Amino acid sequence: MKQILTNNRIFMLLLIISLFSLGSIEAQESSNNIKQLNYVRVYADSLGESHFEDVEIDLHEIDFAPPAPPIFTSDLNSSTRYGFLSVLPGWKGEWHPAPKRQFVVYLSGVIEAEVSDGEVRQFGPGSITLVEDTTGKGHKSKAIGNEQVVGVVIQLEY
C-alpha cells in the first residue's frame, strides 16, 4: 500500500510539472489534447549508438483522488527512487550512459543534449525525457544560458 501511495505521489508530481509552460523550448511540442502527453526518449540501439525518439502516451479520464473531479492519467508504473538535480550555468557532461533507466522532468534552466547519432536537442521547463541509454556510448549534455538547471529524476524499475 505504501508503494502505491508513493507511486501516486510521483505520478501527481509528474502531472503537475507537465502542465508547466514550455516557454521558448521547442524540443517537445505542447499539445492542447488533454488525452495525450508527449515526451522524448533517449535510448541505445543494438550497436550502442544513442538516439532521440518522440513518444506520445494516451491519458484516460479516471476518478484518481475522489472527491476531487476526475483527471486524465496514464497507466501507473513502478519506480525505485526519485530525487532532484541541479547544475549551474556552464556545467558540461561529456559522453556517458545513464546510470539507470529514468525520467527527467525539467523545472528551470535549459539543458542541451547530444546523442551519438549527432542529433542535438534542448530541454527546458516542462520538458520530460525518458533516459534509457544505460549501455553504449551514451549521450553528452550541457547547461546553456544563464539560469541554473533544476529537475526531478524518477528512476524506474525494469
Image: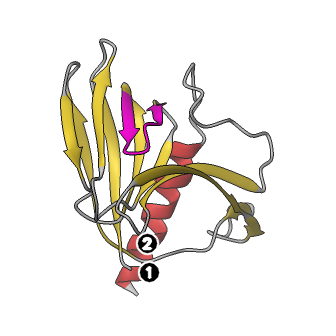
Residue 11 falls left or right of residue 81: right
Residue 9 falls left or right of residue 68: left
Q: Nearer the viewer, residue 96 or 27?
A: 96
Q: 85 above or below 82?
A: above
Quadrant of the image containing the N terminus: bottom left
Counting from the top left corner in percent of width and height, residue 72 is at: 72, 61
Which residues lie in the magenta part?
Answer: 111-122
Identify the element where label 1 is drawn: helix
- Quarter assignment of residue 22: top right
Residue 116 within the magenta-colored segment of the rendering: yes
**What residue sits 26% from the left and 47% below the top?**
84
**Which label sits on residue 7?**
2
Mark 1 sits on what residue?
4
Q: 81 above or below 55?
A: below
Counting from the top left corner in percent of width and height, residue 123 is at: 46, 33
Identify the element where label 2 is drawn: helix
Task: Give the farthest residue toward the front.
Answer: 47
